[in-house]
Image: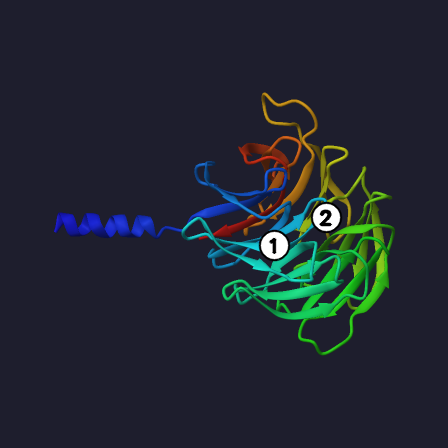
Amino acid sequence: MPNTILMLALGLAAQAPESLLVVTNKDENTISVVSLASGATLATLPAGLGPHEVAASGDGRWAVATDYGAREPGATLTVVDLRTLSVARTISLGPHRRPHGIVFLPDNRTVAVTSETSQRVLLVDVVEGRLVSEHATGQEVSHMVALTADGKTGYTANIRPGTLSRVDLTGGAEPSTLSVGPMTEAIALTPDGTQVWLGSNTTGKVYVVASGAWRVADSLQTSGHPYRIGFTPDGARAVITNPQADEVRVIDVRTRAPLAVITISPPAGKAGPSQPFGVAFAPDSRTVWITLRGSNAVAELDLASNAVRRYLPVGAGPDGIAFTVR
């Protein structure tokens, strides 16, 4: 009997949920998988050239990085099996080069990914490793993508023309385009789907688009370059990273008032700029993790105190980041 109890205990321990961060290290062409319980890197896996963004499935099974390329455009996705901590497959996107923004659909096996060169949002089945469908954005340099909760509608920030595209991923309608502001790169959709926020690289503004009325409703001024925008899962706060200013802004979504402006210092023993880049949130909306490109680390920020709890080391040039539980 004691042996049976021990075996059951070990089995339950092995199946205990584990919170993970997945990070793309674009300067060394790798993907880091980090345990949040221990802070240790569980695996450093090879990716394609210049992996920029990453998405993780809600069931904790898959992570997928976009291999953007360097001087030569990339055209692949690297699929990571988070159960075995190994690269499961590399998916060729054929003529669809410069893949960048990526989000999982609710089925936990299909991703929506932008191709800057073909001006498309691609739906890719990462389990079977095949392109399911492609959807035109009608705009140049469609860089980042956000999805509605049902996965039926995508929004892309189109850098060169400074526009927002709304794309029907069911294939039933032509894309809609809205002029927003110069050089729109960062994008995020509020959890309720009513607002799309976009960052302008050249003006430092973040524009608020009312998705229903399809108009720019407001704008917020930030310092430098609003590189990425994210919303807490409860929809109450927005987090905006500014690598030029080593700054993170926390905004009240309802009032659009600043709640905090936080200067992110590099970890102890490291000099130079921290360069906060990508953002990922805990499900309880209390914690945000931010990649620090200049420090080869991730900062864990407590949104109650607006202070850094700890730094987690990763690879060189971290950019994209995703949270999941396996």
Q: How many marks?
A: 2
Horizontal side of residue 269 vs 174, given as left or right:
left
Horizontal side of residue 128 vs 122, given as left or right:
left
- Whole-percent x, y for residue 36 in the image: 48, 41
**Which residue is under mark 1?**
233
Secondary structure beneath dot 2 equals strand
Determine crowd level at label 2: few under 14, some 14-19, many 20+ residues with C-alpha closer than 10 A.
some
Asked whether the viewer can see residue 194, the reply is no
Name the image quarter holding residue 145: bottom right
What residue is rendered at 78% in x and 56% in y? Answer: 141
- Whole-percent x, y for residue 304 in the image: 60, 40
**In the image, what residue type sits under mark 1?**
Pro
Determine crowd level at label 1: few under 14, some 14-19, many 20+ residues with C-alpha closer than 10 A.
some
> Which label number is shown at residue 185?
none
**In the image, what residue type sits under mark 2?**
Asp
> Which label number is shown at residue 252?
2
Viewer-proximal residue among 49 and 233? 49
Viewer-proximal residue among 191 and 116? 116
What residue is rendered at 50% in x and 66% in y? Answer: 128
Is 87 placed above or below 25 here?
below
- Whole-percent x, y for residue 116 in the image: 74, 57
- Whole-percent x, y for residue 250 in the image: 70, 42
Is 265 placed above or below 162 here?
above
